[in-house]
Structure formats: C-alpha cells, structure tokens
Amino acid sequence: MKLLIASDIHGSAAWCRKLMDAIEAETPDRIVLLGDLLYHGPRNDLPDEYAPKEVAAMLNSLAEQIIAVRGNCEAEVDQMMLDFPCLADYTVVLDSGRSAEGTDDAHAIRELFCTHGHVYGPGLHNSIDNLPKLADNSIVLYGHTHIKVDETLTVGKVQLRVFNPGSVSIPKDGSHSYGVYEDGELHHVILE
C-alpha cells in the first residue's frame, strides 16, 4: 500500500499544482489529506496564488483516491466545495502488514491514526497533547504545525511513531513538503 500524505495546502493554487504533479509522479493508492485545505486562516499570510476554488477543483479531480480529515480552518462551507468527506476529526487507515521487504505477515495489521493535530495530536510543537489509546506500533499522522516530524514516542506502555508531513504551502521549517507511506516505511519529500 502506498499513501501520499499532505497537509496545510491553505488554498494555494501554486503549491497545490506542485502537489498534483507529485501525486502524478508518485502514483499512490490513496491520498491522505490532514486538513487545512482551502482557507488560509486568520493567523497566516495569504499563500502564493491564493485561490480556494481552484484548489477545490484540483482536489475534486482526485476525490475517489482521497481520505481527508478536518483541520482547524475547515468549515461546513468547505465540505460544500469538496467532493470527498473532510469534516471528521480523525480517521483510521489499516495496513494489512506488507513489509518493506515485500513479505506478507497476516498477523501484522498496522493502524495509521490520521488527524490534523488540533483536536488529537502528540503534543509536539504546536499540536495538542491528546491521543486516544492506540495499539503498540501504531502510526500517528498529523499536520497543523507546518513542521516536518518523524519520531518515535512512548505513550504509557506503547510505542508510537508520529509523522507530520510538514506544510504544502506555508512551511514553518523552511521547506514545502509532503510524506509517503509505502510498505510500512515513511519518508518526507520536499516540494520545489
């Protein structure tokens, strides 16, 4: 299973076009969008080529591939513009256990907990410190902070991998980015 993971497009048509090119090149099975898709938000400057209607049209062209969650900038009007659900605070994607070496393990199902980072999050940078009980070795995919993260945390007695793809359009760590999850492995990709 290959997922392309992106967050915080914030209505930037320029950066969404670059993301669309990356999606075409990566050919993922699914696209996971971790919120803040159309609106720039009152705390952010306008991103390059701010055009929410254009971003909605680009994303709608891939609606059947998209799994999305609500960011702190999403509202009901955003859902009216998008052809895929985007108002859930989280969703869970299950990976059937195909390893990076290509072997199957029928007993290894990995849980990918997908959220924006303002209702549920690992407490890193500006994300809220609030996670539900997750199985050992689960992965938490979140956005919100606009900062790339790939760390392992111990929460109670479980190990969690936490991964933030960074921001497509308004990075706070110097580089526009997205993430890729493929056969159990995660990595960041810089968009330029």
Image (cartoon, rainbow, N blue to C red):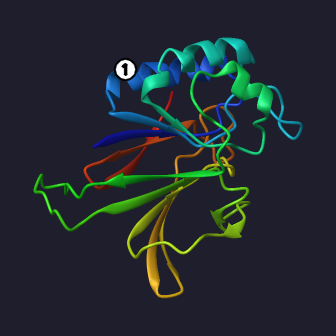
Q: Position of residue 146 (x, y in %)?
A: 66, 47
Which one is in front, 13 or 57? Answer: 57
23 versus 120 height, above or below: above
Residue at left 20%, top 68%? Answer: 107
Q: Position of residue 76 (x, y in %)?
A: 78, 32
Q: Callout 1 environment at 10 Å: few (<14), some (14 to 19), or many (20+)?
A: few
Q: Quadrant of residue 74?
A: top right
Q: Secondary structure at mark 1?
A: helix
| Outermost right residue | 42
Q: How many marks?
A: 1
Q: Position of residue 73 (x, y in %)?
A: 78, 39
Q: Amino acid at mark 1?
A: Glu
Q: Is residue 184 left or right of residue 65?
A: left
| Image quarter hosting the N terminus | top left
Is residue 163 something one can see in this rendering?
Answer: yes
Is residue 49 something one can see in this rendering?
Answer: no
Q: Position of residue 100 (x, y in %)?
A: 19, 54
The residue at which mark 1 appears reads as: 24
67 versus 53 height, above or below: below
Residue at left 71%, top 13%? Answer: 53
Which one is in front, 162 or 174? Answer: 162
| Outermost left residue | 103
Residue at left 10%, top 56%? Answer: 103
